[in-house]
Image (cartoon, rainbow, N blue to C red):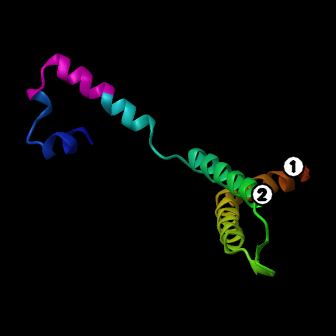
Amino acid sequence: MIDELLEKFGLKYEDLNPTEKETFHTMLDAVNKNQLTPEKLKDYVTAMKYSIETELANEPEYKEVFIFRVRNDKNIYLKARLRNYMLLEAFLLSPAKAKESLERALSGVTPRKTI
């Protein structure tokens, strides 16, 4: 990765002086720490789901226009977004849930004794 980055600018790692190398490594560490991980993605999906739930709770299902009740389209869009985040969350959590249920099943199995 280091060579790839430097190559874009026509540089080589050996050409950098010690201060530049140190700065480069500091910046590279900062980039690596901010990479997307499954845990960060789960946290993001959960936060977005919560924000949509909050907004949906405050949004009326119908709007009054003169003497007519009209369906609130924003309510429908929020429900669709919420459903998408719920599906994504289920997709992200399914391997963990599957592993958990497998561990529960195996914990009930008693080892066989050999004679």
Residue interval drawn in magenta: 15-26
**Residue 58 magenta:** no
- In-front residue for pair 34/106: 34
- How many numbered circles does the render carry? 2
Q: Of the numbered discs in the image, which one, if any, rests on residue 107?
A: 1
Tell me the element at label 1.
helix
Callout 2 amino acid: Asn
Residue 63, compared with residue 46, is above or below; it is: below
Residue appearing at x 32%, y 33% in the figure: 28
Please state if 31 lies on the left or on the right of 97 as rendered. Answer: left
Give the distance between the C-alpha atoms of the residues marked 1 and 2, in whole angstroms.
45 Å
Task: Pick the quarter of the image with the N terminus.
Answer: top left
* Residue 55, quarter of the rendered image: bottom right
Name the residue at the bottom extreme.
68
Q: Which residue is rendered at x = 67% and y = 71% of the image?
A: 80
Please give left or right for residue 56 compared with residue 11 in the image.
right
Vertical position of residue 76 compared to residue 57: above or below: below
Kindly identify which residue carries mark 2: 58
